[in-house]
Image (tube, rainbow, N blue to C red):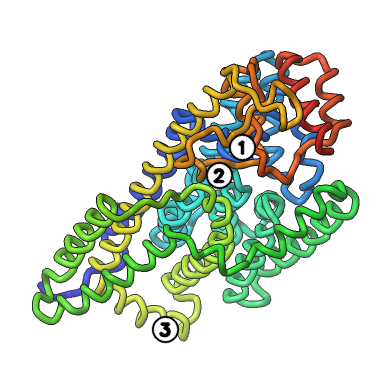
Amino acid sequence: MADQALRLDDHSFRLLVIGGGLGWAVAFPVAALLFRLQLYGDGAMFSYAVAVRDVWAFHWHNVSGRMSVFLLTLLPAEALVWMTGNPSAGIIAYGLLFYISPLIGLAATYAADRSPGRIIFVYACGSTALLCPLIFGFPTEMWLAHAIFWPALALSHYAKPTVAGALLVFATSLLLAFTHEGGLVLLATITATLALRGLRSAAFVRAVASLMVIVALAAAAKIFAPPDDYYADAFLRAALNFFDPAIFEVRIVLVLLAAVIAYGASFMLISKWLPRQACIVALGLLLGALTIYWLHFDHSLHADSRYYLRTALVLAIPLLGAMAAITAMIREEIDLELASLGHSLISRRERALCALASMFMVVTTIHLVETGKFVASWVDYRDAVAGLAMSDQSDPRLGDPRFVSAERIRPALAALSWFSTVPYLSIILSNFAPNRLVIDPAGNYFWLSCETATKSRDSALAVPVQARELVRIYSCLHR
């Protein structure tokens, strides 16, 4: 029938979501390596630590609860520097390993998913397209948590009830829990969804046992590998502000919310007169309005807020994961009451399938535009820092004649500045031979102690000792 609602798993809708997720997953490592985004924000210090083969001492001993990121991205990159003697190769490897993780996560989810229609994989693709662009570019550990969550969810529900299956679930869950403290929240979410299969089900019992062991290991890591006193204070401040509502008071969140609300309102209004064409007409009107906004009214840049919106992932991933698991169980019809409720909800969504697809495309369009603006501005900022590092300009008031202030960079690029890591960025961008170390006078956090920086300077490394001496001077002035 012509007015029959399209099915939620309609082939075209599935292709849209899967194509969107895979498209972003492929684009992330390509864009990151092409524009050297592994150097943005904290990535500059992480990359420098890889180059001087001291990632653990520089920072990661302070965050033992995030060991997965160290083992999967930084340690292999550091090993490559040791084997090749090429610091730049290690930095590229770090960027590749970090930013390709969503693609690897989707491939692992596809392989592990045994749900009807691989619905968990479809949700994973949707989550990748909708959430990951919010933080793309900043090396927050929640990036890796998102990548591991989806295969962990699929394995927890569908791994065989064997010893091998239990070990695979445990290993994946352990990796997830040790990406970020928020990883424990994601792991608890997976366990909660398994409770719907029955408190005596093999999958739930297996998950509870794994969770108990992993929580004990996480606590042990904090006890036996505590952070330095200097970092502990900073970590406490960051933890207290992690769920600050002000995090969401940024332009990108407001634009996304306004776009979704505007589309919903216009769709319902137009449906009264053009019920069959309302979806497309509303989409066209909204895209036109967004184009006018971007061309004539928008002066924002989604840059430093990419770090703080990691909180959005801690909140949104559990929601999407629960929806994926419940939908999968509904299709399995393991519980008649749950299935009855689910079919009722699905039928309503099916009638608005075009609207869902349109909103997906609107959000994707906003992400594309905001990502493009961010990358273009990052290239300008990166070139400005490199120019200062190779210049003869000097600001001795910063502590040394070989220091130059980042305030010399034009104010329009200030949103790209990450005050604590710009010195390391200036070294890398000058091919480890800067004339000047670029310093942000507003900096109030200093990664390295004098002792650590001195030990790094005195080591036999491929990075020129002159660059490491600048880092030593800078660190000893403040710690």
Disc 1 marks which amino acid? Gly
Picture coordinates of residue 33 (x, y %)? 48, 29
**Nearer to the camera, 395 or 6:** 395
Picture coordinates of residue 440 (x, y %)? 64, 37
Residue at image point 51% right, 38% down: 100
User: What quarter of the picture does the N terminus occupy?
Assistant: bottom left
Picture coordinates of residue 382 (x, y %)? 50, 30
Q: Residues within 10 Å of mark 2 (few under 14, many from 20)?
A: many
Is 269 positioned to the left or the right of 56 in the image?
left
Label 1, on which residue?
Answer: 43
Which quadrant of the figure has residue 287? bottom left
**Nearer to the camera, 185 or 463:** 463
Disc number placed over residue 11 in the picture, else none: none
Label 3, on which residue?
Answer: 341
Residue at mark 3 to residue at mark 2: CA–CA distance: 40 Å
Which quadrant of the figure has residue 244? bottom right
As helix, strand or loop, the secondary structure at mark 2 comes to loop
Label 2, on which residue?
Answer: 138
Are circles 1 and 2 on residues that touch, CB within 8 Å? yes
As helix, strand or loop, the secondary structure at mark 1 comes to helix
Residue at image point 34% right, 47% down: 369
Residue at mark 1 to residue at mark 3: CA–CA distance: 46 Å
Instruction: Answer above or below: position of 436 versus 41.
Output: above
Instruction: Answer above or below: position of 109 versus 279.
Output: above
* Mark positioned earlier in the residue sequence (1 or 3): 1
| Mark whose residue sits in front, 3 or 2 | 2
Residue at image point 40% right, 49% down: 21
As helix, strand or loop, the secondary structure at mark 3 comes to helix
Disc 2 marks which amino acid? Phe
Picture coordinates of residue 302 (x, y %)? 45, 50
